[in-house]
Image: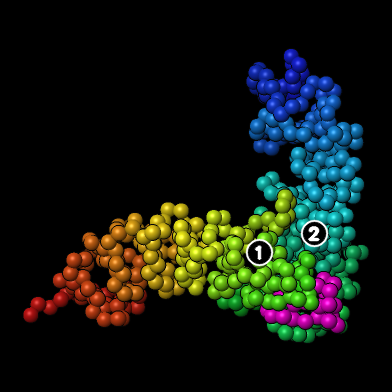
Amino acid sequence: MGESFFIHKDSVVLKKEDNEELFPIKGGIVPDSFGVIYVYKRGWLQFAYLKDRKGVWWFNGAKNKVSFVTTEVDGFRVLDDDYGLDSNHLYLEDKLVPGSAPTSFELLQDSPYFARDKNFLYVKSSNHFHVFDDVDVTTLVAFNAYCTDKDHLFHHYDALSYANESKGEVVDWLRENQPELRGWWHPKYEKSADGADQVAFEWYKTEKEIFYRTEAGVKARKNLRSVYNLVRNADVATFEPLDENFSRDSRAVYYQWRMIKGADPKTFKTLGGRFGRDTSKIYYNGYCVDRADPDSFFPYLSTHYLGIAKDKDHVYRNQYTRTSLPFGHPDNILQPIKGAEAASFELLTESGSWAVDAGRVYLWGSHAKKMDRLSFEHLHEDSPQSWAKDRTGLYNANGRRTVKGIDGRSFVMLNSYWGKDNTSVFCFVTGSIQKTADAETFKVTDDVGGAEDATYQYAIVSGSVKKTKRKRG
């Protein structure tokens, strides 16, 4: 027997499968004009669109609760279980999708993940949902986890990403199933990179189009190949490369092959790496950094992919998260580190492995909650190893490792090869305790790894510790 919704004693209730108990539905739905619009299951939980005299409700089986969706009952329809549509809006479950156009909304064939309307590509799986607008929605075609428009190929895993390097995986299917659409797979595609000449850095051009070149494959396997990504709508006549990532023309600024929304080409400047600015805004990886102050903004370029930066009010780092709320697609964007104090923030290593402010320690740009700021001390960095200590322990940023058996309160660094606490000797080169060494008598003897204690002499040879017994004489 399946689960069913009933009216019982002036309440809407749920009778669950194989259970005689009736569960009142929370949230405010009433018996007056009650009805079931659509029911579906996700795993063993039931979800539904329901209605009463007030309008349409979405039922969450995990909470046994409804939330209100819309007053428009007549004409409300459901697609793919949890897309709800009235005449003016599209909803994912009970959440309105801003900017949606329900009259043009449709599911794309040949894939369970994609839909579109006149404004967006919609990407949905069991755990993820987002919208994407950097596409030509009129030419979208889907095939399993791939989706393409006439110029670019995308792939859906946890999120949607560009996949132009994988065009060979779907080109035959597209030629067979979309022979009339003049996309990149068509012999008469008008924006081919054939014959493109290098302008500067990785920017290339033909007579009418601009491209950004990337590489695919593995260098060690000697199978690297060039991938030419179209810069949509770039003006060849006024196109100007600014550095290896940014370019502009008279109308727009581009990060690699993506147009940067809202950036002013007249005042735009590069700041190095993924960073850029115009008169009023800071940009990172092609996205505007909300709340950043351009005049006081300072990027720590040596931190590379971490993207650590600060201005007068905030400290920032790169995070892979939604590019906008509530349903923007995920990508690498710059966001404030919650609780970081900009005025006292100090980067201790070029790599960004360790940093501090007045009250906190940061490991790779994230608050290291268990570390004691008052006793914290950065020791040294020899990439990829980066060592620090506080009163409770010794730490290596590489692998976020705490060294077992070391007392941080008594530990001292002797040089970049050796350190010790009251009972143990530690080798920074091997990253381990030298078990036979006597901490009380241990001392360094030179600046290239030599050391000794009462019984042995130690040397660093090819990244290992060589131990010899001391001669008595």
Q: Secondary structure at mark 2?
A: loop
Q: Position of residue 426 (x, y in %)?
A: 29, 66
Does any portion of residue 23 appear in the rendered image?
yes
Please state which of the two labelled residues, at mark 1 or mark 2, is closer to the viewer.
1
Residue appearing at x 82%, y 32% in the figure: 56
Vertical arrangement, residue 430 with respect to residue 75, above or below: below
Residue appearing at x 76%, y 42% in the figure: 95
> What span is in magenta?
231-252
Q: Which residue is mark 2?
A: 133
Query: Would you identify the image quadrant in which residue 75 lies?
Result: top right
Q: Position of residue 324 (x, y in %)?
A: 72, 55
Tell me if residue 302 is in the magenta stretch. no
Which kind of residue does numbered mark 2 sit on? Asp
Does any portion of residue 192 appear in the rendered image?
no
Query: Would you identify the image quadrant in which residue 283 lies?
Result: bottom right
259 vs 436, left or right, is right
Which kind of residue does numbered mark 1 sit on? Ala
Tally of numbered tags: 2
Q: Which residue is mark 1?
A: 292
